[in-house]
Image (cartoon, helix red, strand yellow):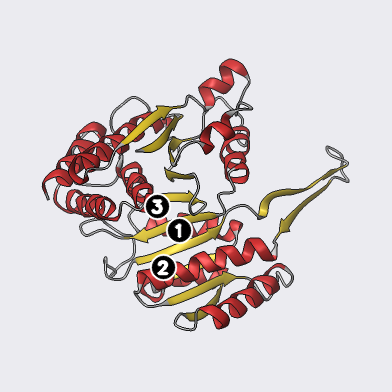
Amino acid sequence: MYKIAILPGDGTGPEVTAEGVKVLEAAAAKFGFKYETEHFDLGGDRYLATGEVLPETAVDDFRAFDAILLGAIGHPDVKPGILEKGLLLQLRFELDLYINLRPVKLYPGVETPLAGKGPEDIDFVVVRENTEGLYAGAGGLLRKGTPHEVAVQESVNTRMGVERCLRYAFDLARKRNKDNTLTLCGKTNVLTYAFDLWERAFHEVGAADYEDIKRDYAHVDATCMWMVKNPEWFDVIVTDNLFGDIITDLGAMIQGGMGIAAGGNIHPGQTSMFEPIGGSAPKYTGQGVINPMAAIAAAQMLLAELGEADAAAQIDKAIAYVAAEKLKSMNAGRMGYSTSEVGDLVADAVATL
């Protein structure tokens, strides 16, 4: 019996999360596993009503669950940064979700803006360190609001944090058994302290324990260029928190857009959190037109992390079928079906394919 926390969040989050749960239910019926859910009303509406972003007991409450399925965080009436830092980043840090996992996979029938590229070219994974770097919150302001104001934001990189991220990425490259290549994305020519640590650890760990995995390196700017020009060059990319945040949004675009891009915030063997990465899209709230595929893909990743490999593979197969055979577009309002109807199509494909 898996315990899954449901955090629908803001905007269209509740709509897409409901479809993710619908597909989980179909997978459970087909593959015989059991789960129970509990909903949490965290997000912008709660903050506006109570002034509370994350209750004191929330982190301990979440530790009792096997996984968290998140809808979206972001409210037009809440100042940017309050929910993102007080809820999302806080959960990442408190639950030590040190891996951000982002598959970049183009499904058949889904449009990519890259001319001449197809599903055989766009199939790689980005492993982003998720609890350190520039997002660790180190730094501050001096003489704020004056002409002599100083802002300092420090990138914090520890050998422990870097190495555990690298080992996860090496293991994933081995598990995928695609090109058996791990690319370190960095900026060694400018960020000579942080990426000196990353590069040394990368080669030391690889040489000691992963001789079967080819090691490659690319500056972050070159990585962006090659993701557009030659995405087929990549198998697994590993990088720090900030660079990972940037290149995964680029990855979402080349795989067909935010409507199908999902990610995981993972601590292997402990409570992990899975989400569509497209945000709350408040302008579409309540209209039934938002694409739930990314939330369904997040549910698929959740099951894969729990070890339900057959169920996860079936959902992936169902997503591919519906994307190729049913939907007119990945864009909100242009799919040819409502949000709920897309969930029905995928759930039916899980049951029948």
In this view, the residue in front, 347 or 135, is 347
How far separated are the C-alphas under marks 2 and 1? Answer: 9 Å
Q: Earlier in the sequence, mark 2 or mark 1?
A: 2
**Residue 106 appears left or right of 138:** left
Mark 2 or 3: the one toward you: 3
How far across and how far down the image is residue 51, in percent? 63, 20
Q: Earlier in the sequence, mark 1 or mark 3?
A: 1
Residue named by callout 3: 305
Residue positioned 62% across, 23% down in the render = 52
For the N terminus, the quadrant is top left
Residue positioned 25% across, 54% down in the render = 310
Image vertical order of residue 237 relative to residue 316, above or below? below
Q: Quadrant of residue 234?
A: bottom left
- SS at mark 3 in the image: helix
- SS at mark 1 in the image: helix
How far across and how far down the image is residue 336, in percent? 18, 39
Q: Earlier in the sequence, mark 2 or mark 3?
A: 2
Residue named by callout 1: 250
Residue positioned 22% across, 52% down in the render = 314
